[in-house]
Image (cartoon, rainbow, N blue to C red):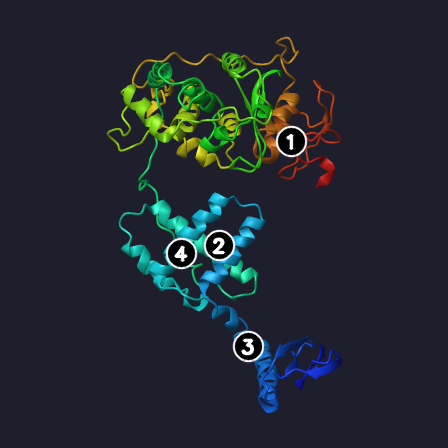
Amino acid sequence: MATVYRRTYWATNKRGERVKRKCNAYTVKWRTPNGVYHVVRGYTDRDASKQLGARLEREAARGIEGLEDPHKDYKARPLTAHLEEYLADLEATEHSAGTCYGIEKGMLKLFAACEWKTLADIEPNGFTAWRARQKKLAAKTLNEYLDTVRAFVKWCIIQKRTATNPLAEIPKVDARGKQKRRRRALTLDELDALLLAAQETTVRHRPGGACSYRPLYYKTAFYAQLRRNDIDTLRWADVRLDVLPPCLITRPETSKSKRLGKHPLPTRLADELRTFRPADARETDPVFPNPPSYKMFNSDLKRARIDKYDEQGRVVDFHAMGRTTPNTMMASAGVELQTRMAMMRHTDVRLTSSTYMDETLLDRSVAVGKLPDLGVDRPDPEPIPMQATGTDDATPDPLHQILHQTTGRKRGTLTSADTAAADPAGEGGACKSCGKGTLDTTPVPAGVGGHRGGDSGLPGLEPGTF
């Protein structure tokens, strides 16, 4: 039963004396059925405070018995309050600020479109109705919205704020063949033209500016298969030019996979980086302090006369140049899939073999040339030479021949006709060629070889196992 009381506290009166006083409101101390005590602030009325304690104890008991929703207080809170705490937890678990910003922006948009204000409002019909109205968003984007809100509700379940995930059974949109931003790889001629266009505009800009080292910037991204953020956060401490082979290091705190990456470099690119490094550069200085923008990259494409979009609607961007292109070229050169996965830092083979692969640039004629010719005269296969037995073309003993021939029959059965041919007199005896066993004229069970007292002549089971 709940107890109510008025707390006392010490205060100083007008005469400067320390006196004990009582609070105006009552304090309610109540206990759950499992013995846990809780203290809440009551009312100034004693009876009303008793009723509050009785109600809290009753609701706790009904919740344990399944008659009351234990999460109703959380479900009544605004979704924005839960979202703020969710984002704070993501930041505490070392998610990047950009990731948290994207989640917050997408979730607020979804909450407003579905008219979800509390956790109790989240239900599958609202999401599916919103998804059906989206005509401009790609299938992959719609699936990302579903994954994001599912992760948020799952976090609420872990935090004991709700019991079930109402969006768990919603199927995803089939994204196969519906990609709105498909990338293509550049050919070798297009890469040379892009570097030449970037080199021609370099002389018209001030040294050290964003445009002065674009060719080297593009080469580094291509040979190390770096993402845009990887190369922009590259420091001189990450460039190991004094080791064999020279390599770049991507740090876990800056890479997308949150893993340490090592990227070998060709000798020519390592020499260019040595020449490019300033004499007073510190280890913590960025390698490319003023990286070129996307607008500059598109300008270089235009000067190189490379179409941004091809006839299939596929796009050429910085990611296609630094990721899709080297993976496709390595595949054409015969580099094994496992090696390409390691260089691309992929954990899913589908990313290496499909997503970052431009199959239109693969040389399929080589594979077709390895197929056999049909409808033509082909030479007979060469006979397989027989292994010598060491008998020097000697005539085999009849008993030995029959015993060895019977091992090729089903279970090695030796019939009465075999024994009659091998031993017309019916005297029995050992095999004259190998000296093993004796010939027995009694019926032999199926599966038992013709030799007695020696090897069975059959592969597998030994004579003693029957």
- Determine if residue 159 is in view: yes
Q: Which is in the foreground here, disc 4 or disc 3?
A: 4
Residue type highlighted by circle 2: Ala
- Determine if residue 415 is in view: no
- The answer to whether marks 1 and 2 mark residues whose Cβ atoms lie closer than 8 Å is no
Check the image and name the residue furthest to the front. Answer: 15
Residue type highlighted by circle 4: Leu
Compared across the picture, whether 394 is left or right of 99 comes to right
Compared across the picture, whether 293 is left or right of 400 comes to left
**Label 1, label 2: how many angstroms apart (C-alpha)?**
59 Å
- The answer to whether marks 2 and 3 mark residues whose Cβ atoms lie closer than 8 Å is no
Q: Is mark 1 on a helix, strand or loop?
A: loop
For the point 38% across and 52% down, the residue is: 172
The disc label shown at residue 459, or none = 1
Is 389 above or below relative to 47?
Answer: above
The disc label shown at residue 66, or none = 3
| Residue 121 place in picture, x, y as percent | 41, 67
Would you identify the image quadrant in which residue 399 lies?
Answer: top right
Q: Which is in the foreground here, disc 1 or disc 2?
A: 2
The disc label shown at residue 151, or none = 2
Residue type highlighted by circle 1: Pro
Is 324 above or below relative to 100?
Answer: above
For the point 46% across and 31% down, the residue is: 227
Is 279 above or below relative to 439?
Answer: above
Q: Earlier in the sequence, mark 1 or mark 2?
A: 2
| Residue 104 place in picture, x, y as percent | 44, 52
Q: Earlier in the sequence, mark 1 or mark 3?
A: 3
Q: Which is in the foreground here, disc 1 or disc 3?
A: 3
Q: Is mark 2 on a helix, strand or loop?
A: helix
**Label 1, label 3: how many angstroms apart (C-alpha)?**
67 Å
Q: Closer to the camera, 203 or 459?
A: 203
